[in-house]
Amino acid sequence: MITDVAVVGAGPNGLMLAGELALAGLRPIVLERLPVPDDQPKANGMLGQVVRMMDQRGLHERLGGGPESPVPNSAYFMFGGLPVDLSVLDESPLHVLPVPQPRIVEVLEDRARELGVEIRRGHELIGLTQDDDGVALDLSGPDGAYRLRARYVVGADGAHSATRKLSGIGFPGVSYDRTTTRMAHVQLPEEWLDTATGALRVPGHGAVRPFLPHRTERGGFSYAPLPGHPPTIATTEWDQPEPAQPMSLGELRESAFRVLGVDIPFTPPEGDGPHLLRRLLGGNTRVAERFRDRRVFLIGDAAHVFAAGGSGLNLGLQDAVNLAWKLAAEIRGEAPSGLLDTYDVERRRAAGRMITHADAQQALISPGTEVTALRELFTDLLADRDAVRRVAELIAGTDVRYDMGVPGAHPAVGRFAPELELRVGDDIVRLAELTRTARPLLVDLTEDGSVAAAWSGLTDRVDIVTGSAMTGGPTALLLRPDCYVAWASDAASPDTAELAALDTAMRRWFGVLEPVSA
């Protein structure tokens, strides 16, 4: 027996992919080396466009957000430890959802199991062989070695990906060996916590805003008070000798003193663990030579790693959603020629932008008087609203626009779905509520309903919704299952040329040849 897709890795990216495949009617198998979920809070939450993506799939509330549309951060953020004043923007693109990674895994695993996904924990990939019809995986499980055959394999198994290595895919890039990062859950003096702003007021130094990197000439410091967990503090220093002893709270306290110049008298965290206590030496910025090798694909850290606080999940989870619908279409025999190849093209570009983000931040937080001068200049630039907008879009990942193959297309084409409210029958709904099925979606808000009428026989391949707009935006648009716009119009009644462009988009992305008359 051959399974459709084997997903190697049960972290957030692998579980997201498995859930998306299940929504598309497949039954993937998830293979995870660890016997139980990792309880280390590697990420403190979701940052950027991925927050809206969670809303598009009905997961925002389950992850701790509200049932309404996610509200962007319109106050402030940081880029390379420099303040970015988002209040100067008419509309901020930057969303933040504080939630520890173990909770993300829990929610995505629950969702995958609800959709019928099989998850095998304690099953390690040790061999992989491809042929024209599928992939043979050699695995070591609790009951011994066995072989599993799949049509396709997706490596979501992290920076040290066995899938990538066994497929012979190179992982070129740069390793940084100058930094030492220390982090831990701690108990802080209650009188230091500013309940009005959320900041940590450090006597003799000043306020440190939550969740944002704080740079001094001697290193970096951050403070993250995640709800329901002890606060996390972290330091980064350059050119420190490698410690001979295991990481300790005392080591972190000494590091914080060197970075800030004052003592922080924290104590061990209260309550049951697990509690974070971690030291990281160096870091990497690397991108796989290719994200696809015939029937093997890579997503998340298996495809790319970089140091840009909070943005890794933004990239990896969108890898998963981008790949899933294309892979499902191929397996169902509905994919147009070349559809699977667009995964590497689109997500490689997104990874490139994120590396620009990471490298720029790395440069801005480094020690040295020349870096301080650069920061002063960059601070001047961030007084300009257009500069703030561009930096905010880079952080959020909203500056990526896919090439949909339509020259001179509507400005929304190639970008993530706009936030729209529409009246459908007697109900007022958000566009995000119409994308929960992960199917292609044609939305017709024109006066005469001509767009929907032209394609009314395509409900087997594309969902069609008609209504009227409650907010501004396109009058008609075609969304891919990953919620990127493939076609759009502002016309009250699109003309022949626009409808022909819609036909082209249908064929390009969904293999639709012609409408089927009722």
Image: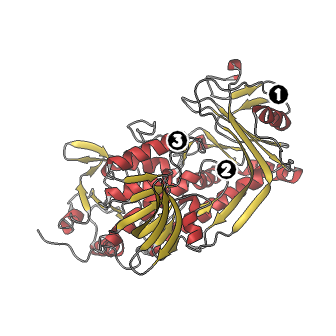
Above or below, 63 relative to 473: above
The label on residue 139 is: none
- The residue lying furthest to the front in this view is 144
Do the CB atoms of the residues marked 3 and 2 lie less than 8 Å apart?
A: no
Q: Residue at x 40, y 69 (%)?
A: 149
The residue to which callout 3 is attached is 102
- On screen, residue 242 versus residue 397, left or right, reads right
Rounded to the nearest angstrom, the CA distance separating label 1 from label 2 is 36 Å
Asked which secondary structure carries label 3, the reply is helix
Residue 110 x, y percent position in the rendering: 39, 44
The residue to which callout 1 is attached is 263
Residue 11 x, y percent position in the rendering: 51, 51
- The residue lying furthest to the left in this view is 518
Q: 143 or 506: nearer the eye?
A: 143
The residue to which callout 2 is attached is 384
Q: Is residue 416 visible?
A: no
